Image (cartoon, rainbow, N blue to C red):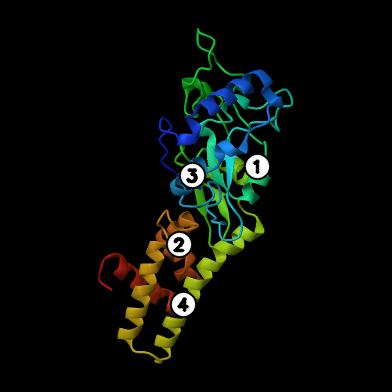
Amino acid sequence: MIRVEKDFTNPPVKLTTDERTRLIQLTLSEKGNHEFKKKVYRDSVYDELVVLYHGKCAYCETDTRAGAPMQVEHYRPKAKVTEDNLHEGYYWIGYEWSNLFLSCSKCNNKKRNSFPVSGMRVMSPNFTQEGLLDVDSSIANSQVFQQEQALLLHPEIDEAERLFIFLPNGRVDAANQNLRAIKTIEICDLNRKDLVEKRLKILNYFFDQLQTELRDLEMQKITEEKARHAIKRLFEKLALLQNPKNEYSRFGYFMFVKFDKFFSERLPTKQGNAAKRLFEQFRTGQL
């Protein structure tokens, strides 16, 4: 999960129509029985989320579009909340822009209607003196919702990337045992087997390429000049993994900034020392 910048005051066209206003009024009367219209989330809403999230899942950073369409996910569940049998769901924000993410089906299915909080849960909407839905208190970063102290991180509000640590075994852990990061990992199952394997596939590619160049140099199969050139190209690709447009960019960030943990310390001593030296030269523009 990484931070995504979204303008909550500038929703897509589909979320500004009279039809959407009418549907919100229906949710207020039908509450948990309201049948949400998926057509509202299509086209402009879905397309805008794809742009904002670079086509990646808000939770795990996977892009599944080549095999299956991404889904529009509700941060606060629009139906009954798993952790509270008395809660009818956050039905009044089912069409709220700040409550909509892009999600892969696996994270969406894992999360479902889970939404634990450590504060006082908001049970019903706020209304204006005129009896209309209070729009300001319906936004995700409103004081009303912030007082809930949601345990699930919100990538458009929280600096989520600072709360996770990625490890050389492909798993993700909570930084400083942060409770919200722990719960987010648990709710979305961010250490599920397929995710760990995909992260490791990226790491292993770079590790194997680096080790091959270092081994060939050690065995004098290639010249030092050729090895330095190849390793520099490899380090340039490694640096680019951190780009938010790429899948698992936060894992890529840790591969780069924790180079010794991910590479040098896992190589034989001589190769590890050489890798560490060459990477430092790359970082300082001397390679």
Q: Give the residue at mark 3.
A: 49
Q: Nearer the viewer, residue 70 or 45?
A: 45
Q: Which residue is mark 2?
A: 255
First of labels 4, 2 by sequence position: 4
Q: Amino acid at mark 3?
A: Leu
- Farthest-out residue, top: 129
Please say whether residue 216 is visible from this viewpoint.
yes
Q: CA distance from mark 1 to mark 4?
A: 37 Å
Write down the quadrant of residue 182 in the picture.
top right
Task: Report the Cα–Cα distance between label 3 and label 2.
Answer: 27 Å
Q: Are marks 1 and 4 in contact (CB under 8 Å)?
A: no
Above or below for 149 versus 274 = above
The quadrant where residue 184 appears: top right
Residue annotated with mark 1: 111
Mark 2 vs mark 1, CA separation in Å: 28 Å
Q: Amino acid at mark 1?
A: Lys
Going from N to C along the chain, the mark reached first, 3 or 2, is 3
Q: Looking at the picture, how far across and down is residue 91, in whole percent? A: 63, 26
**Residue furthest out toward the right:** 85
**Residue 162: where, in percent of width, then height?**
45, 45
Q: What amino acid is found at the position of numbered circle 4 in the picture?
A: Gln
Residue kind at label 2, given as amino acid type: Met
Q: Quadrant of the C terminus?
A: bottom left
Task: Establish if 264 lies above or below 29.
Answer: below
Neighbour tally class for label 4: few under 14, some 14-19, many 20 plus, Cα within 10 Å: some
Say what secondary structure mark 3 lies in. Answer: helix
Instruction: Look at the image and tell me whether residue 153 can be seen.
Output: no
Is 150 placed left or right of 286 in the picture? right
Mark 4–mark 2 CB contact (< 8 Å): no
Residue mark closest to the camera, 1 vs 3: 3
Q: Local crowd at mark 1 within 10 Å, few (<14), some, or many (≥20)? A: many
Mark 4 lies on residue: 209
